[in-house]
Image: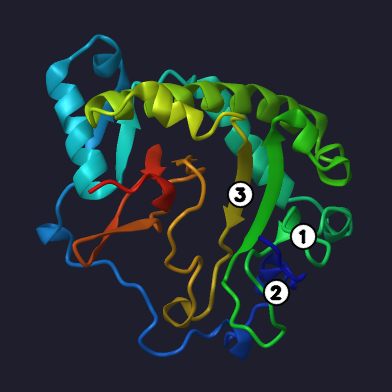
Amino acid sequence: MQSIPVPSVQELAKKSLIKVPDQYVIPEGESVLASNATSLPQVPVIDLSKLLSKDLKELEKLNHACKEWGFFQLVNHGVSTSLRENMKRGTVELFELPMEEKKKLWQKEGDIYGFGQAFVFDEKQKLEWADGFVTASLPTHLRKPRIFNQLPQLFRESIDTYSVELKNLAIEMMKLMGNALAIDPNEMTEIFTEGTLTIRINYYPPCPEPERVIGLKAHSDLGGLTILLQTNDVQGLQVKKDGQWIPINPYLVLSSSTLETS
């Protein structure tokens, strides 16, 4: 997965724009709007503590979530509030760095690590109204020293702890999903033996014409599991179910196209 460097949308948004530059305006018909909230199905909520206590009803709920949805909200997941708050704080502070400091962490052409956007292959390509930041986290030898070693020390420490917690959580969820789907749990975990973990952080600046842009295009994730953490209460994330876009608030677990079931 490679990309070419793009300008900072966060810096662009600081210019008190009245209109969005053409490169960010999405073609008509490509906007994604949530369906009528009063008639939408509810995203499954899975309680990890019940799964760990061998609750068969909760296991059946997980089976349904995997087969019929492909994502679910996870509660009682065991990742401490203090650790999540440290990650949120570090994320906010990362995007508050002066632009001169961010430039040291900007993507290089042909790479995805650092500040920028993914899957940008052409200078004329339509861009998303968002800045992203990507770093490899686990195993540690995959980290790019140019990127990871330049992060604030407290944020690096939070990433270290958070990554281990999420790796353990992901492995546990893979095993439980295997049980729910009547698949050997070892087969589920063997697919991802090295346990690689990449952290992607997205920032969506205010926009003068929000109806003409998109923060993140509709997509399916690569890899095994995606675990999402939201830094504030601004609703924006949507998932697609039976042709309807449903707004949700994570902590959310999404299975990727690699783990599709039928």
- Residue bearing mark 2: 12
Quadrant for residue 165, please give it.
Answer: top right
Q: Position of residue 33 (x, y in %)?
A: 31, 72
- Residue bearing mark 3: 201
Looking at the image, residue 209 lies above or below residue 82: below
Separation of residues labelled 1 and 2 (CA atoms): 23 Å
Q: For mark 1, does the 10 Å Cα neighbourhood hold few (<14), some (14 to 19), or many (20 or more) residues? A: some
Is residue 194 shown left or right of residue 50?
A: right
Looking at the image, residue 126 lies above or below residue 151: below
Residue type at the position of mark 1? Asp
Asked if marks 1 and 2 touch (Cβ < 8 Å), the reply is no
Front tag of 3 and 1 = 1
Front tag of 3 and 2 = 3
**Earlier along the polypeptide chain: callout 3 or callout 2?**
2
Q: Quick one: SS at disc 3?
A: strand
Residue type at the position of mark 2? Leu
Seen at 57% across and 71% down, the residue is 129
Residue type at the position of mark 3? Ile
Count of number-bearing discs: 3
Q: For mark 2, does the 10 Å Cα neighbourhood hold few (<14), some (14 to 19), or many (20 or more) residues? A: some
| Residue at the farthest top position | 53
Q: Quick one: SS at disc 2?
A: helix
Seen at 74% across and 72% down, the residue is 6
Quadrant for residue 177, please give it.
Answer: top left
Q: For mark 3, does the 10 Å Cα neighbourhood hold few (<14), some (14 to 19), or many (20 or more) residues? A: some
Seen at 18% across and 60% down, the residue is 37
Separation of residues labelled 3 and 1 (CA atoms): 16 Å
**Earlier along the polypeptide chain: callout 3 or callout 1?**
1
Mark number, residue 111: 1
Q: Position of residue 150 (x, y in %)?
A: 86, 41
